[in-house]
Image (cartoon, rainbow, N blue to C red):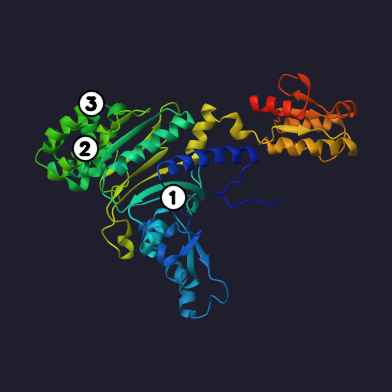
Amino acid sequence: MPSIPKGTRDFSPIEMAKRNYIFNTIREVYALYGFQQIETPAMENLSTLMGKYGEEGDKLLFKIQNSGDYFRGITDEELLSRDALHLAPKFCEKGLRYDLTVPFARYVVQHREELALPFKRYQIQPVWRADRPQKGRYREFYQCDADVVGSESLLNEVELMQIIDTVFTRFGVRVCIKINNRKILSGIAEMIGQADKIVDITVAIDKLDKIGLDNVNAELAKAGIPEDAIQKLQPIIQLSGSNAEKLSTMREVLKDSEIGLKGVDESEFILSKLTSLNNPIELDLTLARGLNYYTGAIFEVKALDVQIGSITGGGRYDNLTGIFGMPGLSGVGISFGADRIFDVLNQLDLYPKSAVSTTRLLFVNFGQAEADYCLQALQQVRQAGISAEIYPDSVKMKKQMNYANTKHIPFVALVGENEMAAQKITLKNMETGEQTLVTVSELIQMINVE
């Protein structure tokens, strides 16, 4: 019995219809905001990928064995050493892409002469990671990224938040958009003299609802944060109220930190421009994603009606292309978690019927003459934009009706001698069982009304 590699999936026609609905919605909204689509190859040179994701990331890269005689140029001594890390670059010059960000950075550097900055790009493609497969974690999965590079304006952040709001409004999913700023976190660490403890601090604060203030303070002490620093953190740990109230508290707490105040100013600008969103947006100081990567605003989106992790995330970074020797190009980006959004829409049953139904009309095949008549009608029906098919074989009616039921086809067209003589078609509504004798144009109208 054949099988597929662990951590990969087959998608059935119904799953593909749902996934395409997700990708097409995101694609349409990206285009609405002036983003242009690019694609990069599934494989990159290993030299492009290695060293960009840290030591752990290097291990998770799928490497592609060279074609031809890949033993050439390797000594017996090297082979016998069995040093996989040392030998891999000699066997493999290419690898499967691990994310869409590094290939995007490579693309910008390679094509910089022809790009108009700021460059607004989106990319929806699969990525591969040699991770240990588990529930919700796959070795092959899609990313849906949008980035603006070559502009430091915070209007880019504002537009990306509007994109998130538009996408989830179209999906009908209620979300909360959370925002923070790396500079605020740096300001907090600077203020209490614990720059290397910022992750410990945010992890502890994040547990306030679950374990209470005393336990949060105990965790901070356990992480090696001195008592006076913990005291200074109290207004931050207990931060509450509206975004404006939170910003006002932070402005007071961080009054002696230049970088912290800059983060407060940036957050205030973004939030002040986003007062008319359909979904709530809130300043959340426990948000600390990608700290070694993001340098300004950080975003994360949580679904309100489903227990699931973050379904979209992103932030501002200062030096996307520095890894390829082209420093100083600032950017900001977001990434929709397509697989998690798929689960959310499934749980809430939010797929529109039109998105998941493929064939709308099946012509039953009663024989050669009837089939010829149906083929004429089929052409008109398809020209009207209705997806339709004819059962290819003239077999028992029951078998053809079972086919329609299995494929969830809502309408069936029946054409026998009487219909041909009257130049009409009997249209059966599979949901109600109702049958109507109609002309082709009436049939088209009835199906399009549904």
How far apart marks 2 and 3 lie (CA) works out to: 20 Å
Q: Nearer the viewer, residue 104 or 390?
A: 390
Q: Position of residue 267 (x, y in %)?
A: 23, 37
The residue beneath circle 2 is 220
The residue beneath circle 3 is 240
How far apart marks 3 and 1 lie (CA) works out to: 39 Å
| In the image, residue 80 above or below residue 151 | below
- Helix, strand or loop at mark 1: strand
- Helix, strand or loop at mark 3: loop
The residue beneath circle 1 is 36
- Mark nearest the camera among 2 and 3 is 3
**Image check: 72 left or right of 203?**
right
Look at label 3 and name its amino acid: Ser
Residue at point 30% right, 36% down? Answer: 179
Q: Nearer the viewer, residue 254 or 158?
A: 158
Look at label 1 and name its amino acid: Gln
Q: Position of residue 139 (x, y in %)?
A: 51, 50
Look at label 2 and name its amino acid: Leu
Q: Which mark is first along the chain, 1 or 3?
A: 1
* Residue 155 visible in the picture: yes
Residue at point 23% right, 26% down? Answer: 240
Q: Which mark is first along the chain, 3 or 2?
A: 2
How far apart marks 2 and 1 lie (CA) works out to: 45 Å
Q: Nearer the viewer, residue 70 or 254?
A: 254
Q: Residues at badges 3 and 1 in contact (C-beta under 8 Å)?
A: no
Q: Nearer the viewer, residue 430 or 208?
A: 430
- Mark nearest the camera among 3 and 1 is 1
**Image check: 154 left or right of 44?**
left
Q: Residues within 10 Å of mark 3 (few under 14, many from 20)?
A: few
